[in-house]
Amino acid sequence: MKKFIPKFIFQIYHYLLSLIGAFIYGFPSKKLVVIGVTGTNGKSTVVHLITEILEKSGHKVASLSSIRFKIIDKEEKNMLKMTMPGRFKLQRFLSRALKAGCEYAVIEVTSEGIKQFRHKFIDFNGAVFTNLTPEHIEAHRGFENYKKAKGKLFLALEKSPKKNKFAVLNADDLNCAYFSQIFSGQKYFYGLKNSQAEFSPEKIGLKLDHLLGEFNLYNGLAAYCAGIALGIQENKILEILRKAKGIPGRLELVIGEPFKVFVDYAHTPDGLEKVYQTLSSLSPELRIPNLICVLGSAGGGRDKWKRPKMGKIAAEYCKNIVLTNEDPYDENPLSILDEIEGGFSEIQNPNFKFQKILNRREAINKALSLAKKDDIVIITGKGCEPWMCVEEGKKIPWDDREVVRREFKKIKISNGK
């Protein structure tokens, strides 16, 4: 149908669905303090941390992310294979939150969701920008369109009738100025490198003992700023963040001995490199890399440009690479792996080994069997996603973490340990 129906017809359709959904559920956002979190990476973690800050400060909170739907103490997995639900589901969620007595709603806002007007008829009080790197480029027909889609959250914030509105912005990101100029209200700039950043780890004394990686410092700073904007005491925020633990599937340690096994959602070149950098820093005394990685790339014709880039990054950081299936949808899985492999040719004097194992379970088993003491196995792309999407719209129940535990147990039994 999309080939024959003009684009503006679909836009009208999506817009009307948003309006009808909000009308049916009584425009619930008008009576909630709504914070939207957008960017390429870190959104789910920032949603989680803001929610924790508010909850542990005594407030009733609802939150919605790629991982979970949570209303006060009732929590359910996001099983939609969709970060930002459709218009009716989203408005219904906000309505349920309001009826449960929530004061706040923290929502992960995606470019695809914005493209389909899912953010419309939500009155935002605040917007948080994490970072921007290329993603969904083919769907948006270019990086600039992708950026503009993200910017519409800040435009919605600017037009929102709410009082005391605020924006939290990553001053280290090259696109910060673009988002800043859209919104004219109170702004909070955070960063690690930009001297103009009002909030940095040094300035506020932020340490995240339980969260690995520089990227989590950024996530912590973003959540800190949101907490300040919402009137939470500085010392209280710092205390909560210092005790904060990671969220499922985000650099989650699944096996600790005799080697470490991590599962992470990283699905962009930038996110992947940051994960590899963080894990490499755990063993700085080693002169050769000790990373064994399981790597794939989403199919369905999406973001094919990133496949060789991710292959190149893996070849730079890992000593063993196992290429495998991720979410091929209707695309040929082997073709996807071939495109990832194409990035290996960019590495001079290669010092890594690789193999292709299409079956993801077998690939994980192989990576575990290759690992020795002090090695780190990192499995990326799916995190704690509950499905693997294959041809003809089929979904296979899945969880990388559970597969790791089962395959590790098999290896231990076969080795007589």
Image (spheres, helix red, strand yellow):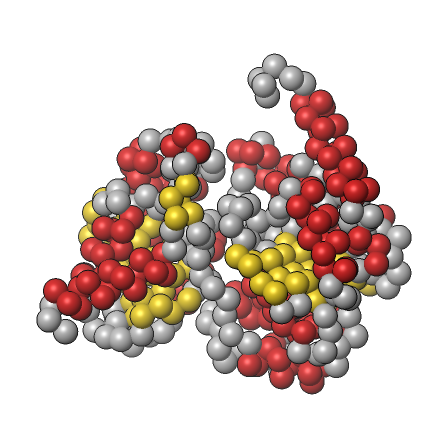
**Residue 372 seen in render:** yes
Q: Is residue 187 above or below residue 259?
A: above
**Quadrant of the rendering where the C terminus is positioned:** bottom left
Question: Where does the image place residue 117, in percent across and percent down from the top left?
Answer: 71, 39
Quadrant for residue 330, please give it: top left
Residue at horizontal 61%, vertical 65%?
74
**Quadrant of the rendering where the N terminus is positioned:** top right
The residue closer to the viewer here, 18 or 216, is 18
| Numbered marks: total | 0
Question: Where does the image place residue 27, in percent across and percent down from the top left?
Answer: 82, 48
Residue at horizontal 31%, vertical 58%?
403
Quadrant for residue 45, please give it: bottom right
Question: Where does the image place residue 286, in percent across and percent down from the top left?
Answer: 26, 73
**Residue 339 seen in render:** no
The residue closer to the viewer here, 90 or 293, is 90
Residue at horizontal 86%, vertical 64%?
164
Question: Where does the image place residue 217, in percent across and percent down from the top left?
Answer: 55, 70
